[in-house]
Image (spheres, rainbow, N blue to C red):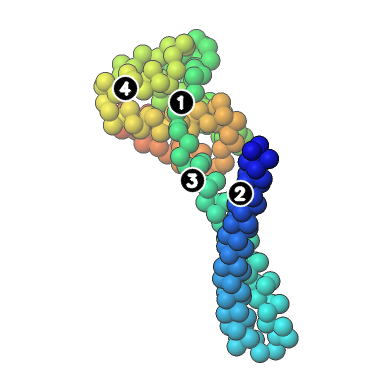
Amino acid sequence: MGEMKDSRERIEDILKEKEYRVYYDESRNIFQEWWNRIKDWLADVLERLFPSISSANGAADVVLFLIMLSILFLLGLAVFLLIRNRRPKKFSTHKPLHSTEELNWTYQKHLQEAHKHQDVQDFSAATRHLFLALLLLFHQKKWLEAKAWKTNWEYYDELRKVNPTLANEFYDLALVFDEVAYGEYQINREEYIQFREKVFVRLIDTEGSEENAQR
């Protein structure tokens, strides 16, 4: 009885293997037929466009390979961009003020430092001082309370209670600040100018005078 059972199981395994093989062959044949049709169509197009081509089928193989390679490249690029754009943006846990000395500076002093760094093409340091100038101006207006131990999350929460629109503008500027100051991102001249313009617009709106913002 045991031998008959073993024989039956072996026969079933063989039949299953044959069924799988038939299914595999059919799938491969369908794919091969689909591929040949595309290749023949492309060869016909190439032969009409370029009658001098000696082997249209060979050229079709090359063109199909290049097309498939391009599609794979574009798909990979699309996935990369999708992942990068969907990456959640959030503040770092670093404190924007490094010391109480920086806290004791006026916002005009930070603006002066920003201009100094800008003149020597150090746009990362200039970006940092521009942001601190804005932060200390908000502190001066009592819209938030600047402390050396606070993070931008805490400043953002304080601003939301005073002015949600202003808080959203601060949020966008703080993201750039975090990437430049702590994310090792090298900001270029064009990006710095855009950042500076946004900061100056807010400084001017807050102080009501462009002269005060550029001092």
Q: What residue is shown at x 54% (from left), y 31% (from top)?
A: 180
Q: How far is the residue under mark 4 from the one under mark 1?
A: 15 Å
Q: Which residue is mark 2?
A: 12
Pointers 3 and 2 in contact (C-beta within 8 Å): no
Q: Would you identify the image quadrant in which residue 36 lies?
A: bottom right
- Residue type, label 4: Leu
CA neighbours of label 3 inside 10 A, class few (<14), some (14 to 19), many (20+): few
Q: Position of residue 10 (x, y in %)?
A: 66, 46
Q: How far is the residue under mark 3 from the one under mark 2?
A: 48 Å
Secondary element at tag 3: helix
Q: Which residue is mark 3?
A: 82
Q: Which of the pair 81/38 is nearer the observer?
A: 38
- Residue lying at the far front of the rendered structure: 1
Q: Quadrant of the C terminus?
A: top left
Q: If you read the primary sequence from the N terminus, does the residue marked by circle 3 or circle 2 appear first?
A: 2
**Can you say whether 48 is above or below 141 in the image?**
below
Q: How far is the residue under mark 4 from the one under mark 2?
A: 73 Å
Q: What residue is shown at x 31% (from left), y 29% (from top)?
A: 166
CA neighbours of label 1 inside 10 A, class few (<14), some (14 to 19), many (20+): some
Q: Which mark is residue 159?
A: 4
